[in-house]
Amino acid sequence: MELDTNLEQLILKLYDIEGVKFGDFKLKSGIQSPAYFDLRVIVSYPALMREVSQVLWQVSMKAEKFASICGVPYTALPIASVMSVDNDVPMLIRRREAKDYGTKKMIEGKYNAGDLCLVVEDVVTSGSSVFETVQLLQEYGLVVKDAVVLLERQQGGTERLRNDGVNLHSVITMTQLVTVLKKHGKIDETMYNRVLKFVADNRFDIPSQPAVVGNGDTTVKKAKAEMTFKERAELCKNELGRRLFGLMEDKQSNLILSADLTKSEDILKLVDIVGSKVCIVKTHADIIEDFTVDFVHKLQDLAKKHNFLIFEDRKFADIGNTVKYQYNNGLHKIIEWADIVNAHSVSGPGVIQGLQKVGLEKGRACLLIAEMSSKGSLAKGEYTKATVDMAKTYSEFVIGFISQNRVCDDQQFLYMTPGVRLEEGKDSLGQQYVTPSVAILQNKTDLIIVGRNIYNAEDPLNVAEEFRQAAYNAYLKRIS
Ligand code: 5IU
C-alpha cells in the first residue's frame, strides 16, 4: 500500500533522528537483524513526538470505542501521554517492577471493571510485549480489543495478537518503511532486499490451535480445541508421563523448580519449603559439590512427602552407547533416582535408543530439547521439526519437549519452558526470559521452569506460590 506524503515525511524524520537504523543488530530475541527500530530517542524531539502521537490517534479510530489508553512501557509511555492530553482521553499506567507484582497495584489510574482500554506500542515484532500488557489489564478487569502500533515489523505479531483476541492496527509496516527509505536514497537496493528477506525468514509462527489428536474414541469425545491435562494423560504412551499429567491437575501446579544450588543441604532445604507448590524438581547433579547417595535418598523422601517428580537436567548428547553409560553408571547413577531426564537431538535417534534401552524398564521418561531459551540458540527451524519427528517415533519413552513454544500440535506431549520470570528480560550470560502468561497463554506451552527467581528470593515459598498461580491460572484460562 502506498503511503501518503505526510507518512513519508514522518519516516524520513524518524530516520534522521536515528529512530531507525540499518546494519547488524541483535534483537531482544537474540536474532541478528539488518534493521533496528528504537524510538526511545523521540523524547528529545517534542514536535516529532506529537506527530507520532497524532498518527497513532488517527489509526486508533479503527478501534472499538475505548474509555482509556495504556502505553506499553517504556517507549510508548510518553507517546500515550501526548495522545491522552491532546485528545482528552484518560490514560492508565502499567507498572513494570517485578518486585511489586502481586503485592502492589500494577495498573495506575482510574477505571471501572469492563472498561475498554486501547493499548499503544511503538514497534511490534512477535507481539509478546503488547500481549503482556493486555494480560495485566485483563487481570485488573479491563477489556482490551485493540492495540495501535507505529511500526509493524511483519514478523507475525498481528496474527499472533489476533489469535489472542486483540486487533492490532499499525501506522506503517516494515515493507512500507524500507520502500520509502529506498525511494529517498537513504538505503540501497541490497539493504532493502536484506530487510525484506529478514522479515520473510524470521516470522514468529502462530502457535497453532492444538488440534485434536488421538484416534477413535478420543477424537470423537473431544470436540473442543484444548484438552485438560487429565484428558491428555490418556493419549500419553508412557506411564510416568500419564502420572505427571494427573499430578499436575491434582496438585494444580504446572510449575517446575530448577534447584540449581551447589550444596546438597541448601537444595534439600529449598525443596522442602517449596515442594508443595511444584510438580517437578529439576536438578543439575554435576553442580552439587557434596553429591552423595544419601542426598538422593533425602530428595526422594521429599518427592514422596510433597508429591513431585525428579528431573535431572543432564542434556545427554552423545552416541547411544555412551549416553547409556552416562545414564546408568558413573558417580551419579542418574537412572537410579531421576524420574525424567532430557536429551539433545543433535546426535540423532541413537541418543534416545541408548537412554530408553536402560530407562524404559525402570519406568523412566525422557524429554527432547526442541528449542532453548538462550540467545542465539541453534535449536530452531528444521532442527526443531526433526526433533519433534524423533519424539513421535519414540513416544513410549519421550513424553515431551523443552521448548519455548508449542512446537507441535500433538497433545500426548508435554511442553516445558525454561527462561521464565515475573518480568521479561535477560541475564548477562544469554538467558532470555518471558513471563508465565506469555509462556502458557501466548506460546501455549504447559509447564514453566523457574530457577533463580525462586531460589534467590527472600521468601521462596511466596514467590513459588505466585509463579504457581500465574502458570496454573494461565492454563485454566486456556482450557476454558
Ligand atoms: N535451562 C534453560 N534454558 C534451556 C534449557 C534449560 O534455562 O533452554 I534446555 C535450564 C537452565 C537452568 C534453568 O537450570 O533451566 C533456568 O534457570 P533460571 O530460571 O535461573 O534462569
Image (spheres, rainbow, N blue to C red):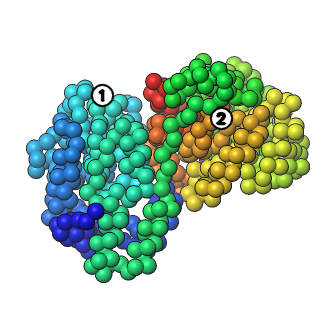
Along the viewing direction, whichever of 418 and 54 lies nearer the viewer:
54
SS assignment at label 1: loop
SS assignment at label 2: loop
The C terminus, quarter of image: top left
Q: Is residue 355 above or below residue 153?
A: above
Q: Is residue 199 visible?
A: yes
What amino acid is at disc 2?
Phe
Query: What residue is rendered at 29% in x and 36% in y?
Result: 144
Along the viewing direction, whichever of 441 and 71 lies nearer the viewer:
441
Q: Quadrant of residue 272?
A: top right
Residue 51 in percent (x, y) is at 16, 61
Residue bearing mark 2? 413
Residue 463 in percent (x, y) is at 50, 32
Q: Nearer the viewer, mark 1 or mark 2?
A: 2
Q: Is residue 138 above or below residue 421?
A: above
Crowding near the residue tagged with mark 2, few <14, some 14–19, many ≥20 C-alpha atoms within 10 Å: many
Horizontal relation, residue 365 to residue 112: left or right:
right
Residue 198 in percent (x, y) is at 47, 66
Residue bearing mark 1? 141
